[in-house]
Amino acid sequence: MSQTKKYRGMLTSSALGEHRDRWERIALSTNPANRSEIESNVGEFYRDTLKCDPPKCVWVDSPRQANRARKGLAYDWDAGKIIDNRLNDASVKLQTHAAARLLGRALAEVHHPLYSDRRSRSPFWDVTQYGVNRHLRSYAFLDFFVTKIGLFKSLKPWLTVLSGCGGFWFHKGTIVLLDTPEILRADDQHRLHCEGGPAFRYRDGLEYYFLHGIKVPRKYVFAETNEIGMTEVLQERNAEVRLALISKVGFSRLLGTVRHWTISEAHGNSLIEFRIKGVQFLRALHVRWQDKTGQKETVIPVPSRRSEFGADCPEDIDDCEQVRRWTLGWPKEAMAVVET
Amino acid sequence: MKAYRQGDVSIMAVNRVPKQARKVRGELVLARGEVTGHAHRIVEGQAFLYRLATGILYLRVLSEFAKLYHEEHGDILLPKGEYEIRRQREFDWRKTGRDEGGLRYVTD
């Protein structure tokens, strides 16, 4: 009997869907960690697989608490590396398994909202080094083989630890375990998002505000849409935050908050002049585009006088397309091949 | 002059990378978003990144094509050649000095 035939019963779309749903629930879980179960699994894995004494488990509610708990502890690079290697080796070996392709396809959309925010200055940088959010899809992949097919059974205790807590740090003789978050809200694309409160909160009260995956100041989340005006949007220095504000309030409503007139239009974009208190006239490009996440629009402040454009001032500063090319730093002779 | 654009990053074909430009080691990241952590990066093909002391980046594509990837924008295939990388700029209207100092690069 071929391998594919042998596993056909386990690889039905409902079984795969159920497995995917389980890991999506794990990604968004805010249930408190079952501490005693996780501790016993940590002990079992250390004893049976790493062949060493179980470490002392120290629980924390947030990375802030973890920093305090980890003070003075020596980092155990070996344990982290060994566990990573075990998981990687198993994943690589299973890539050629008959069930791998179907399973991989079923799990393609499984994401962890924290891992998309893994830049070094992210508040989640620490917890994305180890923990379920790091390689959620690959853990979900492994888990299917371990729990459903019975391969690599020795990894089962560690997969239970991964899926049950928010992260961990290895130290000599101690493992610092992070509890799950108290609040974790995401949009349909698994990006952290909440329009009326924190999108993410640890159990000690440390919280963060996000709009469609973009970390924004608290004031923008709690402000009613009628409290945000075009002036505020144009004042925002960060283009991503500006974009998030426009998506929250709506561009046409923002336009209604300030006197304005359109100077020129081209290819769906427009050059608009605003009358703003204290600044008199301010110009901005209203640009629209479509990307992998959907339709987007934003405003880019541009100069309104020739002297403000600098050396490469466009011939016609009232021409939307020429001003747009100026923002991109394109000389007159530049020929656009691809724009995405 | 051929120009490619992926979001707020423009890639302009140039005759050659300036001699003074130094090779950048590590990942081939043309620009990275501060808030999202998303990056415009070369993921396929052979290429090298160079930087002038002034901060201007250049890209040299040695393979037939190099694939420029970003988490949100569509992929771009850059043919073999040399390129200058430019960031989109905007007007900082809150700055008092209304000259070149009033311009800034778009940060995301």
Image (cartoon, coloured by chain):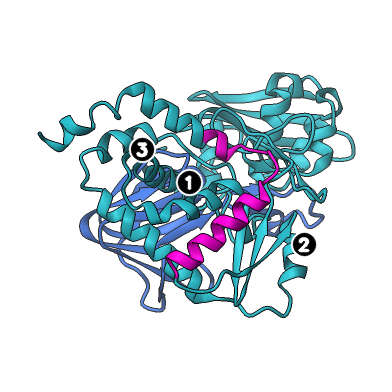
Chain colours: A cyan, B blue
Kind of residue indicated by mark 2: Gln
- Of the pair A85 and B51, the residue shown nearer to us: A85
Image marks 2 and 1: residues in contact by CB distance under 8 Å: no
**Residue that mark 2 sits on:** A65
Residue plotted at (82% across, 48% down): A205
Distance CA(mark 2)–CA(mark 3): 37 Å
Q: Is residue A275 left or right of residue B22?
A: right
**Residue that mark 1 sits on:** A136
- Of the pair A280 and A124, the residue shown nearer to us: A124
Mark earlier in primary sequence (2, 1): 2
Rendered image quadrant of residue A87: bottom left
Q: Is the magenta region chiefly helix, strand or loop?
A: helix
Q: Element under label 3? A: helix
Are discs 3 and 1 both within one chain?
yes
Q: Is residue A28 magenta?
A: yes
Mark 2 neighbour class, 10 Å CA radius: few under 14, some 14 to 19, many 20 or more = few
In the rendering, at what x and y percent does residue A222 appear?
84, 33
Q: Residue furthest right?
A: A278
Q: Element under label 2? A: helix
In the rendering, at what x and y percent does residue A289 appear?
50, 30
Label 2 resides on the chain identified as: A
Residue plotted at (43% across, 34% down): A109
Kind of residue indicated by mark 3: Lys
Distance CA(mark 3)–CA(mark 1): 18 Å
Image marks 2 and 3: residues in contact by CB distance under 8 Å: no
A216 lies above or below A46: above
Label 1 resides on the chain identified as: A
Residue plotted at (61% across, 75% down): A173
**Residue that mark 3 sits on:** A148
